[in-house]
Amino acid sequence: MDWLNPQYFWVFAAVPAAALLFFWSARRRISLLSRFGDSPVMARLTNTVSARRRRWKAGLLVLALAFTTLALVGPRFGTQIREVKREGVDLIIALDVSLSMQAEDVAPSRLERSKNEIKRLLDELRGDRVGLILFAGDAFLQCPLTSDYSAVKLFLDVANPSLIPTPGTDFGAALQLAMQAFDRSTESESSDEKRTRALLFVSDGENHIDGIEGMIQDARSAGVVMFAAGVGETEGAPIPTGRARGQTTYKKDRQGRIVSTKLEEAVLQELAEEGAYFRIARTASSLNKISSALDRLEKSEFAAEEYEEYDEQYQWPLAIGLLLLVGEFLISDRVRPGQKKEDDTLTATDLA
């Protein structure tokens, strides 16, 4: 047996308190009547009031309070087996951490804005498994597929360009690593069911996908749905490399000219040809729409857990309490004068 709200056990103290209050009220009423006049006279004046019925009404109210308090505490007994199935898709987020993602054409920077948008996306997901890949000129699996979104956020917080010093934006390396992560997750599962898999690239697209068309086709053939989110503005922005004495230094080419980086949407749109393309711009973001796109994909069952659950039984004491209240309401403490002997009306003895 268990209790739903054991913190309300203290309310049971109201039951004996109510009983004592009714007892004190009855004694007080008799005392006042005895002071008002002679006992035989007062007995005749109150011959339409049944002391017995008053005691019944008081008893019913006390019992109703006890049963409604029991319902509030919430008794639970009798267990039943429930099965909970967890369904969703396997989603790997490939986040570009190359130096160009430090550009500040979207505040506070392309990288920081991307991390914030991904966190908002994680808050909207339900039941999906998520992995995180960081890539630049190389790729690194920062977090394998997991349903622990808090862990993904922790790994996301530490993402920065220094983790992958190899310059560039190698979509091929990220795609290859994502496929390996998907395969590794499938091998670790005992189920033969085919998983629904999705890959989201978050990048400024500053590279070409020449030479990886075969990898893209293989991924699509394997059932991987690819999405892409473009970060930044198409006008271009310089790349900060450091700050000193209130001055910001920017990346320069060999001729000493400041290098400008801009969003290359065509590359990302080509990657997401069979999925969807989203935009993270200076004043708006459409990345949150990916959650509805994932909902349209076929869900895979990750796990089915069985657990014992107590049956809620609060309705029974609540019903009894309500019936007692109805009974108290229907009983009148008034009687016809001819019934005084049968109903034990107030007598001189009661007023003594």
Image (cartoon, grey):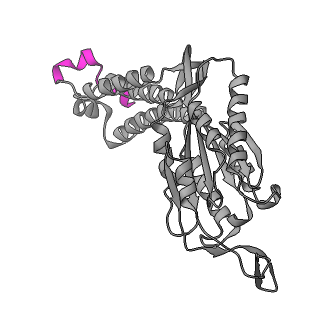
Does the magenta stretch mainly form a helix, a strand or a loop?
A: helix
Image mark count: 0
Q: Is residue 128 visible?
A: no
Is residue 319 inside the magenta stretch? no
Residue that appears at 73% across and 82% down:
257
In the depicted structure, whether residue 113 falls above or below residue 89: below
Q: Residue at x 47, y 43 (%)?
A: 293
Camera-nearest residue between 72 and 217: 217
* Image location of residue 337, percent across then percent down: 17, 24
- Which image quarter: residue 325? top left
Residue drawn at the location 52% of the way across and 53% of the way down:
269
Question: In which quadrant of the rendered view does residue 196 lie?
Answer: top right
Q: Nearer the viewer, residue 109 or 37?
A: 109
Which segment did they paint magenta?
337-352
116 left or right, relative to 331: right
Q: Is residue 4 left or right of residue 171?
A: left
Q: Residue at x 49, y 42 (%)?
A: 274
The quarter of the rendered structure image containing the N terminus is top right
Q: Quadrant of the C terminus?
A: top left
Task: Judge left or right: residue 79 versus residue 62.
Answer: right
Find residue 266 and report its horizontal and vertical position in percent.
53, 58
Q: Is residue 307 above or below residue 100?
A: above
Q: 316 or 103: which is nearer to us?
A: 103
